[in-house]
Image (cartoon, helix red, strand yellow):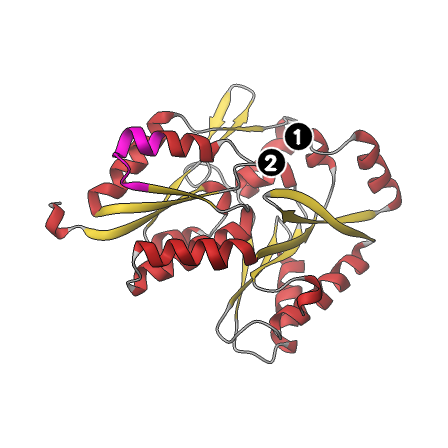
Amino acid sequence: MTEKTKKKLGLIADSSCDIPISTIEKYDITIISVNVIFDDEIRIPYVDLTTEQIFEKIVAENVVPTTGLPPPKRFKEAFDKVLEKYEEAIFLTASKDLSGLWENAIKHAKEMTNDKITVVDTRNTIHPFGLMVLKTARMIESGSSKEEILNKISNDLIPNARFEAFLGTLEFLKRSGRIAGLQHLMGELFQFKPCLTVKDGVVASNGKVRGEKAKMQYLKNLGEKIVNFLPENEIFTVMHSSNMIKAIELRDYLQQVSNKDLEIVIWETGPASSVHLGPGLLGLAWIGPVGDEF
């Protein structure tokens, strides 16, 4: 493809955005995946590994997978692919405080593309990150300039990207070394469900509830406030990990109580995220108000 026939701006994201494959294909988003490592076997999300396969493999083989950064070759292939069709591209990554991918992306984009790729740290992960990817893709499709998009990301999307989610189990966070053993034990014994969010680029606790009913009620109450506060036609995500029945229940409830015309979707966490989050997660992701802003 010649320079004259190329489109102006493409989009790259790392795989922890956890957006559906149908969205990736619709907007021609290039994904750079981290590795999921089972002992001596490496699998690649969005290529040869699904969330369902993660948990099947863990149960069947009694293995504890880890994640690892993609090799330089994977960056090079992705950059070559996107720059064959586009003059330049924006590359959105998960928070640099949660992943080393941002640092590698900065390095490789400069070395491999002569600064034709602009790397942006979204200061978030999983589905709030995914919402930023989707909104960026739609801005590109609508013809916004790179400068307009970068300003929107910096001044609006990053400061207002939110999620609150409950884990089905603390075991996977414990395995990955992200919580102490005592916290894990107390959570399981007394059925406390910590509510996770992201603050200042890192995962944090936003309080906790006790029991499954309290968890669902908390999300219904929070979601009802959000769906009646967001502007018309805004996208709002019910997020889950191998917990589709509860996700549908939550989505259906929010559709019933909303007085707005919203795009309420269900997204599942991707394979790499699920290594650390485990099955049973249920939560909400949106770009907008939080806490006492309602």
- x, y (%) of residue 84? 20, 42
Residue 51 image label: none
Q: Position of residue 106 (x, y in %)?
A: 39, 34
Image quarter where the C terminus lies is bottom right
Which residue is label 1 attached to? 176
In the image, is residue 201 above or below residue 23? Answer: above
Establish if 206 lies above or below 247. above
Q: Position of residue 274 (x, y in %)?
A: 59, 40
Q: Is residue 289 visible?
A: yes
Point out the image quarter for the N terminus: top left
Mark 2 sits on what residue? 275
Residue located at (21% from left, 53% from top)? 7
Task: Say whether marks 2 and 1 touch (CB < 8 Å).
Answer: yes
> How far across and down, in percent of the image, does residue 56 sit?
60, 37
188 lies left or right of 25: right
C-alpha gap between disc 2 and disc 1: 8 Å
Stretch in magenta = 108-117
Q: Is residue 177 left or right of residue 94?
A: right
Circle 2 or circle 1, nearest the eye = 1
